[in-house]
């Protein structure tokens, strides 16, 4: 019944609003995820403005995008290097950068954030942009597990707000979770689904429940791997090999944690601990806290559970 009511309400509340065809995209946060999403959007013909507060990060992001495109083109256009070069140049021409989100959102159909996993910071960002973006602009968050409803509550565009959760590395991972809150209009949801399709991704529809689908299952698995290691029940190498060869996973839990970034893992974990203080699955990991205090954040800093140099 609730499901039926929800869908009828979504359909009614938004009947006057047209679908937004997303062509111009502002992506906020030029880190691992923002740069990856920018790469895929630009290579599929969207015009992209990538925003970060840090100009060095923006330079590194564009350089990384170019490097990744070259890697991909080598394989895809093996017999046609000139067409490959043209593809790279076209994609790069679709990307511009800025340190001021407020000045670039006017022309955007979609504003997608991939900044730090912190509710207050995301809310502050969107509440400011809500006053500057055109009425038709859809806002979306790439949050790993914060509530989309909570992030959207900082704006006056609840019907034009949803979640678009990409996976790392964005150019290779085929899934996007599309999240609708109870206030997201059917048109907004359809536009986000269609955008994911235009990026060449497969989408699944998710409710705005903690961790959506993937992270609700992934987080307890990774945390249990940490506990096994902390108890001395297995070495990190053996646990990684076991999960790769025993389950066919491309990376073991420690390799994957280094890949995601241990700071991001902790931001995610802290959110779950705060909301579920009595659930041992989400209890703090002293090992993780110590590694972060030592600046070992994983692949991005050259060391996490493993060394990368
Ligand atoms: C406590 C909290 C826990 C929750 C955490 C949640 C985080 C988040 O919300 C959700 C996630 O994302 S969860 C995370 C979800 N993610 C996962 O679970 C990831 C699991 N890992 C994997 O799927 C694989 O290991 C990879 C796909 C990463 C690499 O593949 P591989 O076979 O092991 O290694 P390879 O041989 O090196 O690369 C193969 C080819 O790819 C090419 N290439 C590589 N990187 C590239 C890039 N960035 N761009 C473009 N291209 C790139 C490379 O050049 C090569 O091409 P070639 O033409 O053949 O030379
Ligand atoms: N790392 C992953 O595997 C992964 C996967 C899916 C989703 N996510 C989510 O995506 C988001 C970003 O993760 P990431 O791994 O790319 O982080 P990251 O640390 O690599 O990048 C975040 C970037 O945001 C910038 N930033 C922070 N506040 C900003 C602001 N107010 N305005 C503009 N830029 C700002 C930072 O300078 C940084 O470059 C998080 O919400 C994370 O939970 C991460």
Image (cartoon, grey):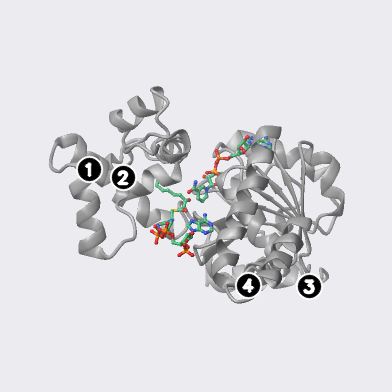
Q: To which residue does mark 1 refer?
A: 236
Quick check: 289 left or right of 210?
Answer: left
Q: To which residue does mark 3 refer?
A: 15
Quadrant in the picture for the C terminus: top left
Furthest toward the bottom, the residue is 79
Q: To which residue does mark 2 refer?
A: 254
Crowd class of label 4 (few under 14; some 14 to 19; many from 20; radius 10 Å): few
- Under tag 1, what secondary structure? helix
Crowd class of label 2 (few under 14; some 14 to 19; many from 20; radius 10 Å): many
Furthest toward the left, the residue is 233
Q: CA distance from mark 1 to mark 4?
A: 37 Å
Q: Are marks 1 and 2 in contact (CB under 8 Å)?
A: yes
**Residue 170 on image: x %, y %:** 54, 57
Crowd class of label 1 (few under 14; some 14 to 19; many from 20; radius 10 Å): many
Q: To which residue does mark 4 refer?
A: 197
**Res. 84 in view:** yes
**Res. 188 in view:** no
Q: Give the vertical position of 160 relative to 235 (above or below).
A: below
**Residue 126 on image: x %, y %:** 72, 42
């Amino acid at each position: 019944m609730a499901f039926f009511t929800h869908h009828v309400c979504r359909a009614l509340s938004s009947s006057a609003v047209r679908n937004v065809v997303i062509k111009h995209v502002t992506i906020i946060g030029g880190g691992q995820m923002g740069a990856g999403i920018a790469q895929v959007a630009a290579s599929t013909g969207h015009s992209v403005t990538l925003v970060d507060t840090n100009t060095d990060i923006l330079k590194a992001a564009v350089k990384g995008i170019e490097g990744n495109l070259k890697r991909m083109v080598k394989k895809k256009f093996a017999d046609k290097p000139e067409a490959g070069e043209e593809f790279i140049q076209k994609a790069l021409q679709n990307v511009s950068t800025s340190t001021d989100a407020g000045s670039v959102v006017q022309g955007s159909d979609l504003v997608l954030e991939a900044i730090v996993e912190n509710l207050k910071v995301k809310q502050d960002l969107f509440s400011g942009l809500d006053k500057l973006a055109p009425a038709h602009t859809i806002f979306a968050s790439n949050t790993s597990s914060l509530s989309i409803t909570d992030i959207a509550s900082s704006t006056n565009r609840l019907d034009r707000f949803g979640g678009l959760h990409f996976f790392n590395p964005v150019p290779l991972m085929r899934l996007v979770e599309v999240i609708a809150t109870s206030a997201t209009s059917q048109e907004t949801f359809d536009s986000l689904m269609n955008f994911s399709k235009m990026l060449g991704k497969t989408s699944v529809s998710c409710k705005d429940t903690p961790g959506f689908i993937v992270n609700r299952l992934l987080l307890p698995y990774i945390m249990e791997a940490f506990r096994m290691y902390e108890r001395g029940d297995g070495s990190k190498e053996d646990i990684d090999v076991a999960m790769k060869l025993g389950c066919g996973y491309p990376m073991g839990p420690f390799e994957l944690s280094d890949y995601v970034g241990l700071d991001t893992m902790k931001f995610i974990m802290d959110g779950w601990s705060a909301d579920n203080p009595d659930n041992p699955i989400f209890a703090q990991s002293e090992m993780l806290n110590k590694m972060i205090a030592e600046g070992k954040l994983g692949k991005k800093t050259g060391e996490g559970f493993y060394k990368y140099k």
